[in-house]
Amino acid sequence: MPARQVISTPDAPAAIGTYSQAIRVGDTVWLSGQIPLDPKTMALVGDASPEGVEQQIHQVFRNLAAVAKASGGSLADVVKLNLYLTDLSHFAKVNEVMAQYFSEPYPARAAVGVASLPRAAAVEAEATMVVGTT
């Protein structure tokens, strides 16, 4: 089995628990869930307002993009995306914002409604990427 490579970048929020930002094994990279934290301040971006939730969605995708880049890839390499929303009424906004970060062919995806997320975030996303060989 290929060795595990821990991925870490200051351009995404530092892990707030016992996990890595991403793990790469061979050509596959598993990106840990990202919530809308500003990587410099570690403060939550946005609030519960519609505008605040849109800010949160953008920050989540910026955080994922930073970890993807540190892994040697980009969001274009994502093959599976899992989204977690505390309010599924924001699903249309997620689709709208996601289209600014991803293009066809879009990754496979799941969207799940959850009761709560860390730091009272409205959205979290995790991804799996396939990138060139190490």
Image: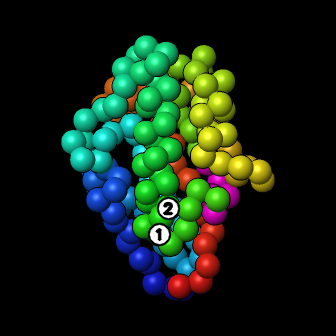
Which SS does the magenta portion mostly show? Answer: strand
- Which residue is at a point 49% across and 26% down the rendered structure image? 54
**Magenta segment includes 109:** no
In the image, is 106 to the left or to the right of 21? right
- Which residue is at a point 50% across and 61% down the rendered structure image? 68
- Sort mark 1 into few (<14), some (14-19) or many (20+) by Cα contacts within 10 Å: many
State the image coordinates of residue 125 (x, y, percent, origin top left): 51, 43
From the viewer's perspective, is residue 44 above or below residue 4? above
Q: Nearer the viewer, residue 56 or 115?
A: 56
In the image, is 13 to the left or to the right of 91? left
The magenta segment is 77-81
State the image coordinates of residue 3 (x, y, percent, origin top left): 46, 84
Q: Are marks 2 and 1 in contact (CB under 8 Å)?
A: yes
Measured in 3D between alpha carbons, the distance from the residue under mark 2 to the one under mark 1, in whole angstroms, is 5 Å
Q: Secondary structure at mark 1?
A: loop
Residue 71 is marked as: 1
State the image coordinates of residue 105 (x, y, percent, origin top left): 78, 53
Q: Quadrant of the N terminus?
A: bottom right
- Residue 133 seen in render: yes
Residue 68 is marked as: 2
From the viewer's perspective, is residue 32 above or below residue 9? above
- Residue 33 seen in render: no
Q: Nearer the viewer, residue 40 or 24?
A: 40
In the image, is 87 to the left or to the right of 49? right
At label 2, the amino acid type is: Ala
- Which residue is at a point 24% across and 42% down the rendered structure image? 42
- Which residue is at a point 37% across and 25% down the rendered structure image? 46
